[in-house]
Each structure stands twice: as C-alpha cells, then as structure tokens.
Image: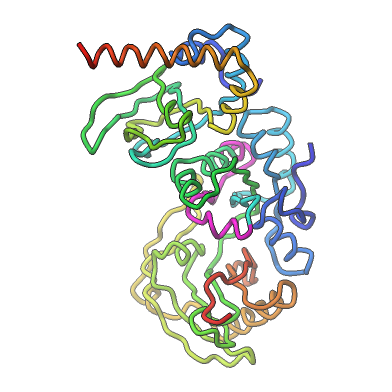
Amino acid sequence: MPGAPPDVIQQVPLFADLTRKQVEEVARLFKHRRFRAGETVIREGSGGAAFFLIESGEAAVSVRGEERAKLGPGDAFGELAMIDEGARSATITASSEVDCWGLTFWDFQPLVEMNGPIGWKLLQTLAKRLRSAEQAGSA
Amino acid sequence: MKGVVPLAKADQHDVFGSKAVGLGEATRGGLPVPPGVALSGPIVEAVASGEERAIKKVAKSVRTLEGPFAVRSSAVGEDGADASFAGQHVTLLNVPSGAELTDAVREIWWSANSDSAITYRQRTGLFVRPSVGVVVQALLDPETAGVMFTQNPINGADERVIEASWGLGEAVVSGRVIPDNYRVARSGEILARTPGLKKIAIRRGPDGGTVDEQMSPEDAERDCLSDAQLAELNMLAARCEEVYGAGRDIEWAFADDRLYLLQCRPVTRAGTA
C-alpha cells in the first residue's frame, strides 16, 4: 500500500485530531525520502513545498547559523511553508542518514480543498497553536 | 498504466519530457544513442509513491538493459524545461541494478520538489505542480567524453566547438576540469586545438556512484582526442543537424572505440540569431 503508515501520521500534531479514515487519506499522500548525512534537508529563507516527518535518523535545526534544536524519529517540520507558500524559517541538516515521510503542497492542497471536515480540523489545530503562541508571547 | 517505453518510442513531450523525446528522436534518426527506456511523469510519481505495480513495471522494463544505469531527469511541461532546471533536477550515475532503481527514481522525483527547485519555480513564475520523466540508460565507461556545439556559441561562426576530457562527461559539464578545446571546420579541417588541464577523470565507482581518478601530469596536459575522433565528432554534428536542425548543444562519449550521443538540445545562448 502506497504512502506512510497511518499510525505514524496520526502522531503528527497537525493531524492528531483527524479521524482514522481521514488520517488514512492523508497518509496515502506521503512519499518516502532519504537524506544523506550532512545533506541540507530544508534551507532557511528558501521556498518550500513539502512537509516532513522523520522516521529514523537525526537532524539539526539552525536559525541564522546558530544551532537551536535536534530532531529525531517522530519529529515533523515544514508545515507552514507547505500551507502558506512562504519561506522556510530555519535550516535543517541531516546529522545522520535520515529517512523521512514527505507530503507536498501539490498533494495536500487538493485534499484540503475537496475535504471540508479535514480542512476544518486542521484549521482548529492551527488556531490552537496560534492561541498558545499568543499566550506564551503575552506571559 | 502507459508509462514505460523504449527510448525509440518516446515521442510525447507532455508525457515523457523533453530529454526523453530528444533521445527518442535521435534513436529513430539512427544516431548512436546508448540503449534505454523512458519513464513518463505519472509512472515516476507512482514509483515515488511506493506503488508496487509501477515499481515492478519499471524493474521489468530494464531487464534487457545491461547495468549499471545512468538515471536522468526529463522535465515535463515547459519549453526548454531541461535547460531551465539544469542543476535543480538530479542525474544519478552508476545505479548498479534494477534493485536500486526505485530509490533513484524516487530521488529524481523529489529533486523536482526540493526547496531549491521550488524556490526557482516561485522566482520564475512556474509555481505549478512539477512533473518529471526519467530516462534510464546503460551507463557507458568512456575513455573520453564531453560537449560539442555544432556552431560556435560565442560568435556564431560556422564551426564545431568541442570540449573534451578523460572519463565521464560530468567532469566537463560540472566544470571540474579545464577541458581540451577544439575548433573544427564543417569541412573537417582542425582549426585549433588547445589542451586543457584535466587533473581528474570521473569514473564509475565499484559500488555505485562515481569516483575521481587522479590523472598523471602527462595525461592531464595532453590532447585526449585524436584527429580521427575529431572527424567522427564532426560527422556526428552533421548527422544531428540533419535530424534536429542547426545549432545543437551535444553531449557525447567515446567508449570501446565507439562514439555515442548522450544528449542533443538546441543551443540556448548562441552569439548570433
């Protein structure tokens, strides 16, 4: 069966509130991608059309050349650029060989446009994240 | 699913991409193209998606080809797409066998969706879903290889301009050597030969991929093409012009004493109209 395992996709916060059937629909759209150690996965400031979920391996996150975090299996990144077509906000570099599941804008947009319930749940998830960020900013 | 054809049957730009169709024309025109197959944009995407049927179909299609393979992207959808996306879409040389082909096809599909390719698309107003075909060919193990313009790309003079180096042509295309430079008149007269500095040759690696071979100082500096080989290249230029028309940018290789055509596309920056 093509696509990522639905159980893995359900763990992504962006998709955590979807029903099992909805998760299966989204999971089918993911494609496997492998990065070699040292390869740039995404680059700060560049355009991007894909969202990634790490299946195995480790990667480093840096902003303006300063390392900020490490990512490992189960971590996901790149959803903002996939949705708003904006620039990447960080650089992510593979520290080891990294196996990912990737979802592109080209597959994701039609799914959301044609599937109101999925779009609504994603909107709720993003609204929750925005509220959390605002509360953290005003604290 | 229609999606894999021998190169000779690749004739639809919007299905197989411009590189595949160009090589298809060359094959049909009797030019010496290494054997290969063309994969359509949809089957490349299906392979990248992990669809078993598509993966098996592609693996079956290359059974008659002698490995290792050169696996190249063939951009679909825009005029001059391969030239536009040169450097964005990857080429994978020395893919050992059909078993590794799925990963290679998937990597090429992702190269069309990489951040650099998407940034390029956004900047050039081509922000549409990319479609990329793939050409799979038997990889040569050339003694020499390089590029040739059927007319001078700088001043438009009616002469062949040839750049050559040892091993695979990627050394010339990627600018990793100073290639030998030759100018040959349409009549076959050698107008100029300027030896380069070819310190490395890119060769097939033992376990896939490529390796750099260090050349001796003598080989680095000596001409890598004979007069007879230049005459063969001049004839190939004439044949390409017969098939495609004037003003061609050619990639070629000599392997086992035979001249092969690897790519033939219009010159994009000729000095004259």
Rendering coords of residue A84 (x, y %): 46, 31
Q: Is residue A36 rendered to the left or right of residue B270?
A: left
Looking at the image, how many numbered discs can be counted on the residues?
0
Q: Give residue A92's position: percent from left, percent from top.
A: 34, 33
Q: What colouring method underlies this structural image?
A: rainbow
Query: At 50% across and 52% down in the image, what residue appears?
Result: B124
The residue closer to the viewer here, B135 or A81, is A81
Q: Where does residue A104 sit, x and y in percent of width and height?
A: 53, 31
Task: Give the quarter of the image for residue B2.
Answer: top right
The quarter of the picture where residue B266 lies is bottom right
Q: Is residue A54 above or below residue B154?
A: above
* Rendered residue at 54%/77% (across/down): B270
Q: Please give the range of residues in magenta.
A: B79-103
**Quadrant position of the N terminus of chain A in the picture:** top right
Q: Percent x, y for residue B102?
A: 61, 36
* Above or below, comparing residue B268 to residue B184 in the picture: above
Asked if the magenta segment contains residue B4, the reply would be no
**Screen quadrant of the C terminus of chain A:** top left
Residue drawn where x is 59% and y is 70% of the image = B250
Residue visible at 58% across and 72% down in the picture: B267
Please name whichever residue, A104 or B201, is drawn nearer the observer in this view of the structure: A104
